[in-house]
Image (spheres, grey):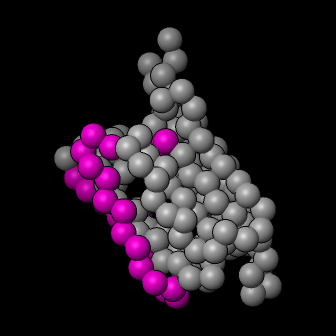
Amino acid sequence: GPVVVRMGPCGGCGGGARDVDTRGVDRVVKVVVRHGDAVDAVSVLYQRGGRQEWTDLWGGPGGELAEIWLRPDEHFTGVEGHFGPFEGNVVVRSLTFVSNLRAYGPYGRPEGVPFALPAAGGAKIVAFHARSGRHLDAIGTYVVVKVE
């Protein structure tokens, strides 16, 4: 059966840990990104069984708002970006979300150390985890891997 693998997080070590219970999560429906010179925050809407549920806003209220709506046949296959110092902390400076249909972003400013969290071999990203405070300090993924 399928196994859920936790990858990352990539970024700085500040902020508090943000997580989600992946049991029963079917897919990501929508991602909201707040961004400016860095990535201020993300919030994720999940489909779990027949219900949809939001995470909290992981980060702070600064920046401008971007919304990513995934189609029913669409799922994320990777997240990439940059992290580096910003206002005294190492945070996520830019984020790009890659799906099986297209790429969204980059949000923020692509400066600093590049990182990539690909879900190899057609695997799906079903959820995210993070560290956040006033900004998005780090981001990671949960990937469903089919095990024979």
Q: In the image, which residues are magenta? A: 51-77
Q: Is residue 22 visible?
A: no
Query: How many numbered marks appear?
Result: 0
Location of residue 31 (image quadrant): bottom left
With 78 as the anchor, is 66 left or right in this view? left
From the viewer's perspective, tell me whether residue 12 is left or right of residue 70. Answer: right
Q: In the rendered view of the protein, which quadrant contains the N terminus?
A: top left
- In percent of width and height, residue 105 lies at 50, 63
Judging depth in this view, the residue of 11 and 21 nearest the camera is 11
**Frontmost residue, 78 versus 109:** 109
Question: Residue 119: horizontal and vertical position, in percent?
Answer: 56, 37
Q: In x, y percent, where is residue 141?
A: 56, 48
Q: Residue at x 38, y 44 (%)?
A: 101
Q: Residue furthest top?
A: 148
Residue 27 position (above or below residue 9): above
Q: Residue at x 31, y 59 (%)?
A: 69
Residue 25 shown left or right of residue 39 in the figure: left
104 relative to 122, above or below: below
Residue 57 among those drawn in magenta: yes
Asked if residue 18 is positioned above or below residue 1 in the image, the reply reads below
Q: Position of residue 142 (x, y in %)?
A: 53, 44
* Nearer to me, 98 or 129: 98
- The residue sitting at 46% across, 84% down in the picture is 64
Residue 109 in view (yes/no): yes
Where is 4 relative to 103, above or below? above
Q: Is residue 15 magenta?
A: no
Please state if 31 lies on the left or on the right of 146 as rendered. Answer: left
